[in-house]
Structures are given as C-alpha cells and as structure tokens.
C-alpha cells in the first residue's frame, strides 16, 4: 500500500448525536468520541438542526478519535449520516441559509397530500421507489426555496447548493472542493431514479427543484476528495446513509438477509439483490448500496419512533433517569396489564404512512403505572417491527425464514430483544459491535483503500454477541400483536 496507514476513521452523524470511531485494519474499534446534538422544535411537528452545530461537532469528534494518531496512519474516512435531512447553503461562503430540516419534520404534510390528490404518487413511486410523504427531502427543499427570502432566485442563478448531511459535511471538510453525495443518500430525496441511477427530470419538475442545486452522485466506496482539517491530508473514501451503512456493517450481503437498526427511529432493510422489488404494501424500494456502478436493492420499512419513545419516558414523563433503566423497569410490569403505546409523536411510518396520526395509550387501568408504561414503550418497537416483516413477506414471498440482525442503542436492552424475538417468532442476532452504522462506513473506506474485500467475499468483520430465540407461545404472540393492530387502527386519521 506504499506506506499507507492501516487505520480507518468513521464519522457517524446521527439525529441526536455525532460520533467518530477509529477502527484498526480488522475493523475492531480503537477509539470513540461522541457529542449530543441539540434539537430545535420551532412549531408543532417541526424538527430542525443547526448545520454549524453539526459541522463543529463532526470536526471535534474526528479530532478526538484521532488523538495520538498521525494523519498518515489513517487509510481513509467513511461518512455516514441521518438521511433525508435537508441542508441548503451558499456556495460562496459555505454557510447554510436556514437550519437543517430534519427527516422527522412534518411541515410539508399538506404539500404531500396535495400531490397525492393530484395523482402523482404512482409516478413518484415508479421512479424513486418512495412514497409522497414529508419524511423525504424533496418537499423540504421546496419549502426552503419558497420560504427563505431570495432563495429560489439564488438557486436558479446557481449560487446555492443542496445536500443531505453527508454532502454538506463533505463540502465543508474539503473546503468547498467537492459537492457530491452517494447513491444511497440520493435515493432518499424523491428526486432520484433508482433504476437508471440518476437525478430524474420529471421529479425535479414536479417538486420545482433547480438542477443546479444538486450534488454529483457517486458510488458508496469512491474518491470523495481529501480533508486538510485534521492535522494533515486524509482521503475521504466512503459514504452511505446510516441505514445502508448499517446493512453493510451487519454483512447482509446476500439476498434475503435482513437487518434492523434501533436508534431514534427504527429501520429494517431486506436485501433483495440486483433487481428492485416494488412494494404492494407501502414499504419503500431503495438502494442497499452501489459499488463499481452496480446497484444492490432493498425493501425498507421505516418506523419514526423507537428509541425516541424511551427519550419521552425520560424527558417527557420523568419516570426514568437514563435510557438503560427502561428495560429494568419494564421487567417489573404486571403481566396481567395489556397497555399499548402507539408512538405516533410525529405521525406513523411504514406500513401506515399517516402523517397526521398522533401518539396514544390504550388499555390503562388503575393498576397501570411507571413499569407498565416503560414496558409499553419498549414493546411498541417490537410490534412495529412485526408489521414491517409481515409486509416484507407479503411483498417478497421468496423471503422464507429469516434471522434478524439488530443494531443501535436499544439493542443493549435484553428485555426488548427477547420480546422482539418472541413477537417475530424468529431468532434475533445481536453483534459484538453494535455501532454497525459506523462499522459500515469504515468498511466502505477500507474497501476503497484496498484494505478490505468487497461484499462478494465472505464477511470477516461481523461477529455474534448473542442470539435471542423465541420463547413465547405462538398463540400468545399473535394475541398480543392483534391487540396492537387494534390500537393502531384507533389512531389512524386516513
């Protein structure tokens, strides 16, 4: 490798925090740094981040993770990010015109409803694989162009740049030298044709997005330029949206393999191979990754609230002091109480896609208390995952029996993982490295650097920590899930 370093650096910019992890050549974590990200809620259903906070924190954690290591020891940086979140910035200054509009934000629900009423969803789905929902980037970007003074005129003149968070970070890390994204992030914008692998002119017209705003789309493992902000020049060699990076980190390389990430939300991706499978059950068709110009596809189910329900227990209700207490408290709940929490705090995602649904609690009795609410919050994650897997099996009958590979902060809860296995009636595998999003970003950088084999080779970086086997009687699991479905139906607005 001509003296090239053997370490890899992953930047994982998430919804609630930003972390950097340094890995050795075997993808074993060596150092970690993390900072919490401030959330802004300027109006009901609105969620924003300050782009300067994101960049400042990203640079800080990268430097912390590199402590004691020379830039020449790093073979490459991989970037992974919260998807769909929109940043609009000035090309001359690199400064954002507005706070980033976060994927959870619902301010464009009416615009999406109007487009659906106009009969546009079939075309949008056929090209992008996605649905008309405020979750995705296009209507957020259109809102910025229409509501920030002068933005649309500046965009038409080519003075502005748009990107998801990866693209904004890349621009800033390279000093404005590179305006690019990868195919997985592009595929989450509602502006990208996932079959042809390019920005779609018809979608750009529909959402009134000037092409001059858009970044170049590259493979997930590619030359993304260099940064000189870490004490020396280091190549940026990999980029993927967080859920796609986690799919690679979980080594779900073969069609039929399935992973689910439990962070602020929950995202399950099923590898469907070289051909897209378009859902009949309101799942998303997306890219798993793109390497060497070849696309691998996935079916995805997106749940908006998973770990965020535990945050609500802590910050909203004050019944726990830290997230780790939720599982302990849930285990103390009265098994005779059947309390259901439908966590529609920002609407419901797949397979319901109801932007106007809101959270609700059902089954309360005088004997229900803190423990029962904690259990209901954790169980809601399993119920929503079961809904996703049922839809996936209906869309792709060849899926067969599966093992679910899990990652993210909630997987530390044995209570939650055991209930998940019970409700699914399938094994749940927790890996030794649960930060598989960062692991996948490092894997991409290592591939591009020539240190690691591609996904056509057997995985060497995935190792099992624990397998949770179903223990609940199947009829009990079905009864519990039926109660959940009844609760969801009571919250739906359409």
Image (spheres, grey):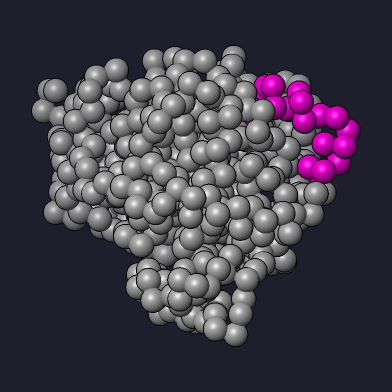
Please name the residue shown 54% across and 32% down the image.
Answer: 392
Residue 46 visible, this angle: no
Q: Is residue 129 magenta?
A: yes
Q: What range of the chain is rendered magenta?
A: 111-130
Q: Is residue 98 left or right of residue 448?
A: right
Residue closest to the far right: 118
User: Where is residue 225 shown, x and y percent of the image?
Assistant: 38, 30
Residue at point 24%, 19% (across, down): 457
* Residue at screen point 62% across, 61% down: 342
Residue 150, horizontal then vertical, whole percent: 78, 47
Q: Nearer the viewer, residue 460 or 490?
A: 490
Whether residue 402 is visible here, answered yes or no, is: yes
The quarter of the picture where residue 351 lies is top right
Residue 363 at x, y percent in the picture: 62, 71
Residue furthest bottom as drawn = 366
Relative to 450, is 493 on the left or the right? Answer: right
Could you tell me residue 278's position as x and y percent? 62, 23
Q: Is residue 92 above or below residue 381?
A: above
Residue closer to the observer: 446 or 134: 134
Asked where in the image residue 204 lies, by quadrant, the reply is: top right
What residue is rendered at 25% in x and 55% in y?
32
Membership of 373 in magenta stretch: no
Q: Quadrant of residue 61?
A: bottom left
Q: Quadrant of the N terminus?
A: top left
Please indicate whether residue 342 sits to the left or right of residue 319 in the image: right
Q: Main secondary structure of the magenta part?
A: helix
């Amino acid at each position: 490798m001509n003296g090239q370093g053997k370490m890899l650096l992953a930047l994982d910019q998430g919804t609630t925090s930003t972390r950097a992890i340094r890995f050795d050549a075997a993808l074993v974590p060596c150092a970690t740094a993390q900072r919490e990200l401030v959330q802004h809620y300027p109006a009901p259903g609105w969620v924003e981040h300050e782009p300067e906070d994101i960049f400042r924190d990203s640079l800080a954690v990268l430097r912390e993770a590199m402590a004691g290591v020379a830039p020449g020891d790093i073979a490459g940086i991989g970037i992974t990010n919260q998807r769909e979140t929109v940043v609009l910035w000035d090309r001359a200054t690199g400064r954002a015109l507005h706070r980033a509009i976060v994927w959870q934000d619902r301010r464009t629900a009416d615009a999406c409803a109007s487009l659906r009423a106009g009969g546009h969803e079939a075309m949008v789905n056929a090209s992008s694989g996605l649905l008309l929902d405020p979750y995705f980037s296009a209507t957020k970007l259109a809102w910025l162009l229409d509501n920030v003074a002068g933005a649309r005129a500046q965009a038409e003149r080519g003075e502005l740049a748009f990107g998801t968070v990866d693209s904004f970070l890349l621009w800033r890390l390279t000093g404005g030298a590179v305006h690019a994204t990868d195919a997985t992030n592009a595929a989450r914008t509602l502006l990208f044709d996932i079959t042809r692998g390019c920005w779609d002119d018809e979608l750009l017209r529909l959402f009134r997005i000037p092409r001059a705003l858009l970044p170049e789309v590259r493979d997930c493992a590619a030359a993304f330029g260099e940064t000189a902000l870490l004490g020396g020049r280091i190549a940026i060699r990999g980029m993927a949206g967080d859920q796609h990076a986690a799919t690679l980190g979980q080594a779900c390389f073969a069609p039929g393999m399935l992973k689910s990430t439990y962070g602020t939300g929950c995202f399950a991706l099923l590898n469907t191979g070289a051909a897209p499978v378009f859902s009949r059950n309101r799942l998303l068709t997306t890219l798993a990754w793109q390497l060497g110009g070849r696309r691998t596809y996935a079916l995805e189910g997106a749940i908006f609230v998973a770990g965020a329900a535990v945050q609500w227990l802590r910050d909203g209700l004050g019944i726990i002091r830290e997230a780790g207490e939720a599982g302990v408290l849930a285990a103390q709940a009265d098994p005779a109480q059947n309390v259901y929490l439908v966590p529609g705090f920002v609407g419901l995602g797949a397979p319901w896609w109801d932007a106007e649904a809101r959270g609700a609690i059902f089954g309360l009795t005088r004997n229900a208390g803190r423990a029962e609410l904690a259990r209901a919050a954790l169980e809601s994650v399993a119920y929503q995952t079961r809904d996703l897997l049922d839809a996936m099996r209906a869309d792709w009958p060849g899926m067969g029996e599966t093992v679910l590979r899990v990652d993210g902060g909630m997987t530390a809860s044995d209570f939650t993982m055991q209930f998940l296995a019970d409700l699914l009636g399938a094994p749940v595998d927790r890996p030794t490295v649960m930060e598989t999003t960062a692991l996948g970003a490092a894997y991409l950088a290592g591939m591009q650097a020539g240190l690691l084999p591609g996904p056509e080779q057997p995985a060497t970086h995935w190792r099992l920590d624990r397998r949770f086997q179903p223990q609940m009687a199947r009829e009990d699991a079905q009864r519990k899930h039926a109660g959940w479905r009844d609760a969801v139906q009571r919250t739906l607005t359409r």
